Amino acid sequence: MSFLSKTLSRVKPSPTIAMSAKAQELKAAGRDIIGLSAGEPDFDTPENIREAAKAAIDAGKTRYTAPDGIIELKEAICAKLKRDNGLDYTPKQVSVGTGGKQTLYNALMATLNPGDEVVIPAPYWVSYPDMVLLAGGTPVVVEASLENNFKLTAEQLDAAITPNTKWFIFNSPSNPTGAGYSHDELKALTDVLLKHPHVWVMTDDMYELLAYDDFKFCTPAEVEPQLYERTLTCNGVSKAYAMTGWRIGYAAGPEHVIAAMRKIQSQSTSNPCSVSQWAAIEALNGTQDFIAPNNEKFVRRRDMAVRMLSAIDGITCPKPEGAFYVYPSIAGLIGKTTPAGTKITDDETFATALLEEKDVAVVFGAAFGLSPNFRISYATSDEELKEALNRITDFCASLS
């Protein structure tokens, strides 16, 4: 009999973390690796946020806080949700966790029972299905097609819902595709949810501020106020504020769900880092002037990636509306062989061969539930991104 829990057999390690670790290992061994696998901005955390953290340390704000966050941060989150999304919440309706991942996990742990189903559009962030499995639920994956720019249709959502459906997980702009749902596209989905009053919405808005061109972000409870009482609006400061390592995420929703999440957190990690919480207050309340210039850089990189990848024979690369990812299809490369003799049978063999033969780390599409694709994070310098794209171009040209 195994010493380890049977629960572990239901989940797998994060493929994005595994690919990043492999790239770091090769880099440490002296290889000239360019990593495009991690979803992490290359910008420094803005100075005003860093200064707020230093001030908190100097003021001795380094002790335990309430299990799910200080009242000052919860008030800042409520103000942000009202200001940016038109949503009214009180601090009792807010939970602050150690990163966005923990808030999602806490919510699933607090609400799922065996037999409960969670509808997840694919491509999905790699952790969604595994968190559902860890919580004892059943992920119901619905594939959104390349032809529809990786967006779920109302008809697909309606068909996926059963009497056992408890949650619909929604992410826009998306990791891994960068696809963003317009107001009308989201309204079509919320209209379906109104027909199924037993289904709750868990919306992951982590990339809200990374929206480009004419795309306007909106969130489900904003689009359809009738869903307010069964929506958990999740967000964080990691991406737009370049605070990935600070580990602050949050969720707002009905008070009884937040209380249940608080109970989970109080018996697991307890409070998020006290200093990070004070930094997050400054992120939400302070100047937002750096976001637009940073987004201009992301747009430039996105356009470079889409242009260069689309020029490769055998690759199709849609233009995303937000985030900092592209999710090209390699359908036209399946069956070809690399100079080292590796046959490209799927997106995993493609990504592995690209790393081994051209020293470029990407994440294969199967990790996100939709193949044959791969994800590139363009949250890196223009120079590194261009070099990586040139290597990918050369690699694909060398296939026979």
Image (cartoon, helix red, strand yellow):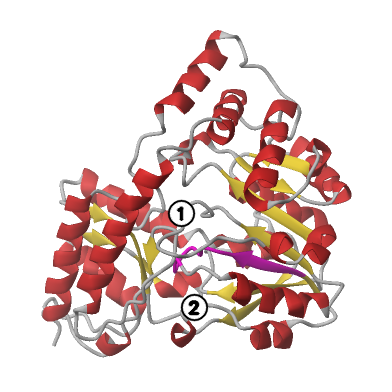
In the picture of the structure, the residue carrying the numbered disc 2 is 150
Specify the quadrant that holds the C terminus.
bottom left
In this picture, residue 264 sits left or right of residue 388: right
Quarter assignment of residue 136: bottom right
Q: Looking at the picture, tell me which residue is in the foreground, 243 or 303.
A: 303
Quarter assignment of residue 371: bottom left
Magenta stretch? 167-178
Point 48% across, 65% down: residue: 215
In the picture of the structure, the residue carrying the numbered disc 1 is 210
The answer to if 175 sits in the magenta stretch is: yes
Callout 1: SS:
loop
Specify the quadrant that holds the N terminus.
bottom right
The answer to if 286 sits in the magenta stretch is: no
Q: Residues within 10 Å of mark 1 (few under 14, many from 20)?
A: many
Point 59% across, 25% down: residue: 278
Q: Is residue 36 visible?
A: no
Q: Is residue 299 above or below residue 247?
A: below
Callout 2: SS:
loop
In this picture, residue 292 sits left or right of residue 260: left
Q: Amino acid at mark 1?
A: Leu
Residue 120: percent from the left, percent from the top?
A: 63, 72
Query: Residue 10 got which mark?
Result: none
Point 15% across, 58% down: residue: 387
Q: Earlier in the sequence, mark 1 or mark 2?
A: 2
